């Protein structure tokens, strides 16, 4: 029986979790900072790192208590060391280093993006390869081909905004609050998603990379033309017109995510499609993925929402890969904000 303590502080969630034997989650605690950042319409790095410092101790204690365990029963500490906000990452890395040093435990360095991919394995430990993983969050929109466990080949990425960032910016320009993804998801229910035909993004070089800035600009132009936005107080009632706009935007964003994904999944003849990251909470995307699963020859796996948004269970889950291979980080591990997968 192996227990790994996972720590995640790459953006605006302070998280700790205890996993036993790859997929039994004994605890997963996430302290969100949304309240601290919402009035700025996005994450403020200075505030995020200060909040992490305040939260990390209580979050760790709660994760151990909920798992009904102590550090004496932990076998390794896995921590996100990038990519992310450097000041935020430093808090998690320094915390993991001091626990590992004090308890003489192996330290495992986890790439946040690999954490998102591995989040699927918490609920679905047996997945057929080759698999295609769509990581779609506030900071990333990438497609990785996984020929086998632990190997990742970048197939497509966003050339500008991440999908979640586009949701956040569209919500902001309509005064709908932060983070925009969940707000738009809710407002779009029962709205007319065919009300506006937003332009489909096609790359000039015919690559399958993503791009969301054109779509965002199209929404902004429409909002300015119709003189919307400024009249909507944050959190106020949205009109039917606004609901139709966000539903149409959501449809265009989901369509783009899926047409790229489907083209690569077919080209690479994958057996599994994994959809992870905060935007994988989106109900329209989840529904469209289920429909895909019925038509296509591959299986589709989307984690429960609590594992798709940033959390530490996925970091511990990725940690097991390294633990099983005996690959540990040096005590001098440094955070790397621009880390690639
Ligand atoms: O994975 P995550 O928690 O943090 C990052 O690594 O970025 O993702 C956060 C992003 C935000 O941009 C948020 O708006 C988006 O995920 N998001 C959603 C939904 N829930 C969260 N986007 C669309 N629909 C949702 N239901
Ligand atoms: Zn993330």
Image (cartoon, rainbow, N blue to C red):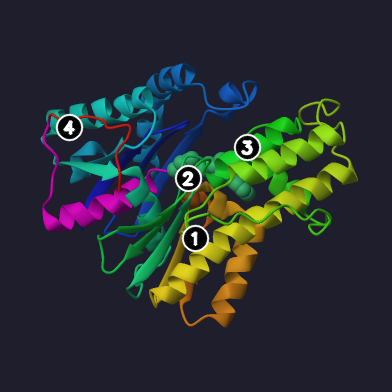
Q: Answer few, some or many: residues within 10 Å of disc 4's Cα (few below 14, many 20 plus, some between 14 and 19).
A: some
Q: Nearer the viewer, mark 1 or mark 3?
A: 1
Residue 214 locus on image (x, y percent): 63, 44
Q: Secondary structure at mark 4?
A: loop
Q: Which mark is residue 168?
A: 3
User: Mark 2 = which residue?
Assistant: 159
Q: Is residue 225 above or below residue 265?
A: above
Q: Is residue 70 visible?
A: yes
Q: What residue is pinned by disc 1?
A: 206
Mark 4 or 2 closer to N-term?
Answer: 2
Q: Is residue 68 visible?
A: no
Report the Cα–Cα distance between label 4 and label 1: 40 Å
Q: Which residues are the magenta region?
A: 310-331
Was residue 91 drawn as part of the magenta stretch in this picture? no
Q: Mark 2, mark 1: which one is toward the viewer?
A: 1
- The circle drawn on residue 61 is none
C-alpha distance separating marks 4 and 2:
30 Å
Secondary structure beneath label 2: loop
161 horizontally vs 114: left or right: right
Mark 3 and ligand 1: say if the CB distance to the nearest ligand atom is below 8 Å.
yes
């Amino acid at each position: 029986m192996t227990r790994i303590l996972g720590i995640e502080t790459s953006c605006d969630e302070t998280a700790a979790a205890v996993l036993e034997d790859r997929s039994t989650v004994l605890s997963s605690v996430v302290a969100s900072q949304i309240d601290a950042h919402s009035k700025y319409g996005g994450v403020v790095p200075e505030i995020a790192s200060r909040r992490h410092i305040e939260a990390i101790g209580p979050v760790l204690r709660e994760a151990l208590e909920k798992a009904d365990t102590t550090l004496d029963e932990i076998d390794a500490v896995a921590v996100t060391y990038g990519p992310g906000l450097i000041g935020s990452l430093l808090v998690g890395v320094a915390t993991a280093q001091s626990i590992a040093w004090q308890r003489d435990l192996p330290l495992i360095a986890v790439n946040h993006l690999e954490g998102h991919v591995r989040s699927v394995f918490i609920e679905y430990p047996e997945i057929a390869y080759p698999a295609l993983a769509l990581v779609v969050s506030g900071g990333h929109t990438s497609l990785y081909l996984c020929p086998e466990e632990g190997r990742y080949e970048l197939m497509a990425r966003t050339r500008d905004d991440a999908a979640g960032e586009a949701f956040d910016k569209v919500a902001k320009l309509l005064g709908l609050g932060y983070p925009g993804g969940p707000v738009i998801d809710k407002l779009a229910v029962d709205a007319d998603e065919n009300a506006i035909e937003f332009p489909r993004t096609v790359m000039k070089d015919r690559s399958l990379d993503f791009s969301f800035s054109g779509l965002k600009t199209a929404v902004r132009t429409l909002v300015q033309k119709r003189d919307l936005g400024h009249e909507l107080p944050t959190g106020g009632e949205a009109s039917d017109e606004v609901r139709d706009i966000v539903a149409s935007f959501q449809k265009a964003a989901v369509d783009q995510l899926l047409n790229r994904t489907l083209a690569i999944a077919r080209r690479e003849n994958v057996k599994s499609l994994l959809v992870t990251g905060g935007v994988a909470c989106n109900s329209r995307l989840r529904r469209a993925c289920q429909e895909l699963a019925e038509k296509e020859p591959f299986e589709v796996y989307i984690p429960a929402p609590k594992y798709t948004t940033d959390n530490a269970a996925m970091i511990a889950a990725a940690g097991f890969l390294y633990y099983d291979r005996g690959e540990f980080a040096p005590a001098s591990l440094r955070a790397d904000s621009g880390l690639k997968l």
